[in-house]
Image (spheres, rainbow, N blue to C red):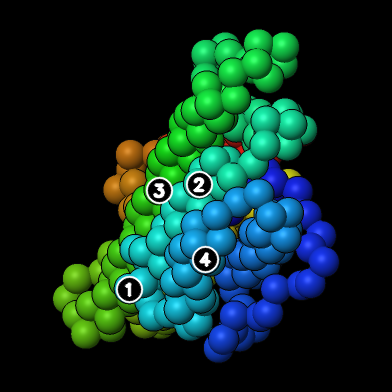
Amino acid sequence: MIDQETQPGTTPETPPPAPTGSTVPTAVWQVRVRTKLDDLYQQLSGLEAGGTVNPDRVAALRAQLSGVESVLGRSGVVEWLRGGNLEYAWQTIHSVERAMVGLRTPEELLGLLPAYQSAAAQFLKADDKVLTDFDASTDAAAPARFQAKVQALLLRYHSASDEFHESVRRLRNRMLGLSVFALIAEVLMVLVQWRSRDVQLLKAPTDAAGVPAWRLLFFVLIAGALGAFISALPSMITSRSGGLPYKLPFQQGLLKLAIGPLVAVVGIMLVIGGLVETTVNSTAALLGVAIVFGAGQQAVTAFADRRASELLTPVTKD
């Protein structure tokens, strides 16, 4: 998952060798993981070069990080939806970061503490005790207790971050599922209308009496998608993803484009049925009404917009 760089790199005297079999990442989240891995490898080398840490402990942490290398390749659709590789990579990195706290001196931890707190503040409440319970004068006098407090801070921060990314991924999958369902429903509507000559979902205007019903339905769906696109354009341009790998703004736009045509068809059926006080006497009027109803998808997809806005607030605030 996307995370903040909470530990500045320490330049070692000898750069660590590149892990065997490392490849150029193919996705943005993999680039971030690769960069974080390189940073942690350098930090471990710097700690080892200082001569104050157990080399076996450093080797164990390196081995733990090397396990992440295997997930930085291409993954299938199922893995993309589940996010197992993403979760494994960042939870392993988080575990190593917490373990490295025990290898640092109190002076180093005091220097890194503001960075830890700044990153944790994105996901924790401002008055959370684990975030504020630090005092430089007393913490320096009790190194073991200070290390435990820093590890507790990172543990709470990492847990909140993991839960946040899981929620975002679930929302992404739900919006994608609804989009696919809507698109399948629209294709089935056109196919059924094409095969069925007895039942017409839409009544043809007087200037389109000879147009096949399925073709008229198809153009109404296109007009509904156009209306959805026009109404969704401002929010799609101004929305921010917060650097997340789930591309929520794109998924929101896809959902709107998929739902808009369905709303347009339902709206025109209400017009033809007399439930809405308006008339459709020409093809231009029919398509115009379809565009208006397609733009009305905002009322249907507002729940997804609100949820996405709530989730992205911590990572998009200035």
The answer to whether the residue labelled 1 contacts the one labelled 4, judged by CB atoms less than 8 Å apart, is no
Q: Gap between marks 2 and 3, in whole Å?
A: 23 Å
Q: Gap between marks 4 and 2, in whole Å?
A: 12 Å
Q: Where is residue 296 in the image (x, y as percent from the top left)?
A: 51, 44
- Seen from the viewer's position, the closer of residues 29 and 177 is 29
The secondary structure type at the circle numbered 4 is helix
Q: In this view, does 145 lie to the left or right of 107?
A: left
The secondary structure type at the circle numbered 3 is helix
Residue drawn at the location 48% of the way across and 83% of the way down: 74
**Label 2 packing within 10 angstroms: few (<14), some (14-19), many (20+):** some
Answer whether residue 245 is visible to the viewer in this image. yes
Q: What residue type is labelled 4?
A: Ala
Q: Gap between marks 4 and 3, in whole Å?
A: 31 Å
Q: Of the two numbered discs 1 and 4 on the same chain, state the one appearing first in sequence.
A: 4
Q: What residue type is labelled 1?
A: Val
Mark 4 — residue? Answer: 59
**Label 3 packing within 10 angstroms: few (<14), some (14-19), many (20+):** some
**Label 4 packing within 10 angstroms: few (<14), some (14-19), many (20+):** some
Mark 3 — residue? Answer: 166
Where residue 216 sits, quadrant-wise, is bottom left
Residue drawn at the location 55% of the way across and 88% of the way down: 21
Q: Which amino acid does label 2 sit on?
A: Ala
Q: Where is residue 301 in the image (x, y as percent from the top left)?
A: 45, 44
Q: Of the two numbered discs 4 and 3 on the same chain, state the one appearing first in sequence.
A: 4
Q: Where is residue 15 in the image (x, y as percent from the top left)?
A: 76, 72
Q: Of the two numbered discs 1 and 2 on the same chain, state the one appearing first in sequence.
A: 1
Q: Of the two numbered discs 4 and 2 on the same chain, state the one appearing first in sequence.
A: 4
Q: Gap between marks 1 and 2, in whole Å?
A: 32 Å
Mark 1 — residue? Answer: 78
- Seen from the viewer's position, the closer of residues 139 and 242 is 139
The answer to whether the residue labelled 2 contacts the one labelled 3, judged by CB atoms less than 8 Å apart, is no
Where residue 99 is drawn, which disc sits there? Answer: 2
